[in-house]
Structures are given as structure tokens and as C-alpha cells.
Image (cartoon, grey):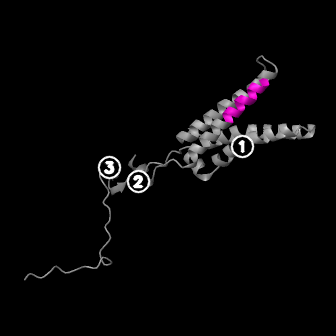
Amino acid sequence: MPTPPPRRSPRRAAPATPVPSATTRSRTPGRGFGTAPAAPVRPVAAPFAAVFGLLVAAEDGYLGWLLWDADPGWGWYLLLPAVGVVLALTGAALVLRGRALGGRLSGSAVLAVACLLPLLGLLGLAALFALLGAGEEVWWTVLLLVGPVGGLVVALQRPVRGWTRPQRPRRLGRGAARAR
């Protein structure tokens, strides 16, 4: 009768190490195989920041429409809401795509500025309505603060700021500088 193969304890088995595939390895001259840098992953908060940016753009458009409705015609006072709409839409698109504006200003900074301007305006408007004794208008103004406050909170979170940070050019190491 043949003898059964010896049993091994599962605790004593060596852990299997995954072998990098050819797509994740790159050949570095003189240094062997290295792993390619992982592609950046969009943080969960980035789409929420973009949605708040769209909400701020809609609120800016609504405030612009209220200004235009009071005095139909194109005046200089309609320029600020129009710039706010463009800034909020730009910030939302930059945050969603993980880009920076130009090479120096992150997308989250653009969105934060786009949220800060209506926040200050709405706070001033709420204070004015409170001084005039218009209680219902104060509460509607406070309700409009949800968009800018939410946009500021989400846009200034560390993962969103890191996602939209401008890419700095990498400095050459000593070996690469000597090779020139």
C-alpha cells in the first residue's frame, strides 16, 4: 500500500508574493526593473465638490437674474454674477478632472474662490435683511448659503486639494545630470 504524501500545516506555508506583470514593470537603464507609478485615483469628495460648484453657479445665475429682473437691461452690476457663474463652472470642471488652472492655481482654489464670493455677498444680504426686520427673507438667504458653504467645505479638503494640485516638473537626479 502506498504511503500518503506528508501533510503540511497551512500556518507554515510561505505567503505567495505576487509577481508584477509586464505592464506594471518598466526597465530602468542600469537599475533593473522598477514599478511604474500608479495612476492617481480621484477622491470620493471630488464629484461632490463639482456638484456644489454647479449649485453655486446656479445660485449666482439666480442672483443675477434677480438683479436683471429688478431693472431689465444690461448694466455693470450684472458683471459680478456672470463672472461668478463662469468661475464656479470652471472650478467644478477643474476639480472633477483633477486639473489646475494654468500652471500655478489648483482647481480646488478656483472653486473655493468661486464659493467665497457668493458666501460673503449672501452673509451681507442676510445681515441687511435682518436689520430691516424682514425675517422671511433672512431665512431664504440663509437657505441659499448651503451651496457656497458646502462648496468651501468640500473643495478645501486635503484629498481634493491634492487631486487638483498643479504638477511640478520633476528635478533630475545626480545620475541623469551627469549623463548630459
Most foreground residue, 37 or 135 = 135
Residue drawn where x is 72% and y is 43% of the image: 146
Element at label 2: helix
**82 to the left or right of 92:** right
- Asked which quadrant contains residue 55, the reply is top right
Query: Residues at badges 1 and 2 in contact (C-beta under 8 Å)?
Result: no
Residue position marked by numbered label 1 in the rendering:
146
Question: Does the stretch in magenta take in 41?
Answer: no
| Span highlighted in magenta in the image | 56-67
Q: CA distance from mark 3 to mark 2?
A: 26 Å
Q: Amino acid at mark 1?
A: Val
Q: Amino acid at mark 2?
A: Gly
Q: Quarter of the image for the N terminus: give it.
A: bottom left
User: In x, y percent, where is residue 54?
Assistant: 63, 36
Q: Decide whether the magenta segment is chiefly helix, strand or loop.
A: helix
User: In x, y percent, where is residue 96?
Assistant: 55, 40
Residue drawn where x is 38% and y is 51% of the image: 36
Element at label 3: loop
Which marked residue is nearer to the observer: mark 3 or mark 2? 3
Q: Amino acid at mark 3?
A: Thr
- Asked which quadrant contains residue 99, the reply is top right
Element at label 1: helix
The single residue placed furthest to the right in the displayed view is 132
Which comes sooner in the sequence, label 3 or label 2? 3
Residue 175: mark in rendering: 2
Residue position marked by numbered label 3 in the rendering:
23
Residue 119: mark in rendering: none
The single residue placed furthest to the front in the displayed view is 136
Residue drawn where x is 68% and y is 45% of the image: 150
Q: Is residue 101 visible?
A: no
Query: Residues at badges 1 and 3 in contact (C-beta under 8 Å)?
Result: no
Most foreground residue, 98 or 5 = 5
